[in-house]
Image: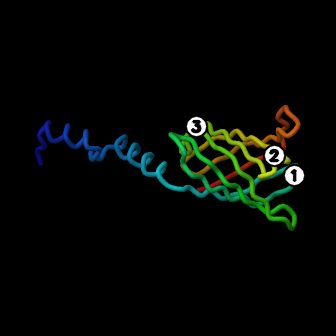
Amino acid sequence: MKVSPGLVVMLAVCGLLATGAGIAVLADETEDAKEITLKGIAVWQGKRAILKAVLTPTDDKEYDVVYTFKWGRRDNTYYGKIKGNLKRGTVRGTGAPQNKARTFIFRAKASRKGIIGKHYETTKGNPKLTGDIHLKR
């Protein structure tokens, strides 16, 4: 089938051209418009906890996040922010309980599969490495 150059330009402008780049752009826009749930583990000073993170987009590659996990017998909820491309590259985040008794940051690498990185406690000022974070889609 022969396609006219005018039709190709019109499809590209409308975002309908099925090229690899066009699909990626449309997927990024669609994903950023909805809530994203990641699940995995956090290791804190050698102890593991099942971690769930629910991200709500607030801006381009910025999210509000609610982390839930069980530590011992206690259910915990932390709130924070995540910035970065969740599909590839560097991602940074924060987290703290509502009373801000403890504060954490994390630095991680993101891929289409999830986020893998390190978290640090910042309650007393300078970041102190406290463990690993592994979250999957």
Q: Secondary structure at mark 1?
A: loop
Crowding near pointer 2: few (<14 within 10 Å), some, many (20+)?
Answer: some
Tell me the distance, in whole angstroms, between the alpha carbons under discs 2 and 1.
Answer: 7 Å
Determine which quarter of the picture holds residue 85. top right
Q: Amino acid at mark 1?
A: Gly
Give the mark nearest the N terminus, 3 or 2: 3
Give the mark nearest the N terminus, 3 or 1: 1
Q: Along the line of sight, which residue is nearer the eye, 64 or 108? A: 64
Q: Secondary structure at mark 3?
A: strand
The image's mark for residue 46 is: 1
Label 1 near label 2: C-beta < 8 Å? yes
Pointer 3: what residue?
Answer: 89
Tell me the distance, in whole angstroms, between the alpha carbons under discs 3 and 1.
Answer: 26 Å
The image's mark for residue 131 is: 2
Q: Could you tell me residue 45's position as x and y percent?
A: 88, 49
Extreme-bottom residue of the structure: 73
